[in-house]
Amino acid sequence: MIDSFFARYSLLTIVFGSLFTIADRFSITPGFVVGGEVRPITFAEGLYVSIVTLSAVGYGDIVASGPAVRMLVAVEIFLGVMLILFGVQAILSTPARKKD
């Protein structure tokens, strides 16, 4: 069960890191502000944004500035919260083992 949670969490991180990078590449203007400078992000920076978003840390060193990327961030936050809620629900609904 825990392995499944981490696999889904990792997959969500990689998928959204890729989507951030792809959306940024195909937009007319860069969709992120990196260190106060509007510029395209690399794939590593896309993964970093995804990890920071899913962990709810929100450092603010890379910020989504375009409307399409902000929508992607909102979807990732929603899915991340749902994943955590379903994980907690699965843990709480697991029957306790009896000790012999």
Image: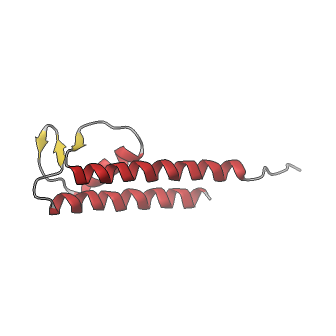
Q: Nearer the viewer, residue 38 or 97?
A: 38
Image position of 84 (left or right of 1)? left
Image position of 4 (left or right of 64)? right
Is the N terminus in the top left, top right, bottom left or bottom right quadrant? Answer: bottom right
Query: Residue 27, position in %: x, y?
Result: 15, 59
Q: Is residue 48 visible?
A: no
Query: Residue 6, position in %: x, y?
Result: 51, 56
Image position of 64 (left or right of 79)? left
Q: Is residue 59 visible?
A: yes
Residue at image position (56%, 61%) is 4
According to the image, what is the colour scheme of the structure? secondary structure
Residue at image position (35%, 48%) is 74
Residue at image position (17%, 43%) is 33
Image position of 29 (left or right of 62)? left
Query: Residue 46, position in %: x, y?
Result: 26, 54
Query: Residue 55, position in %: x, y?
Result: 42, 43
Give the number of callouts.
Answer: 0
Q: Examine the image and state in which quarter residue 37 appears.
A: top left
Residue at image position (38%, 56%) is 13
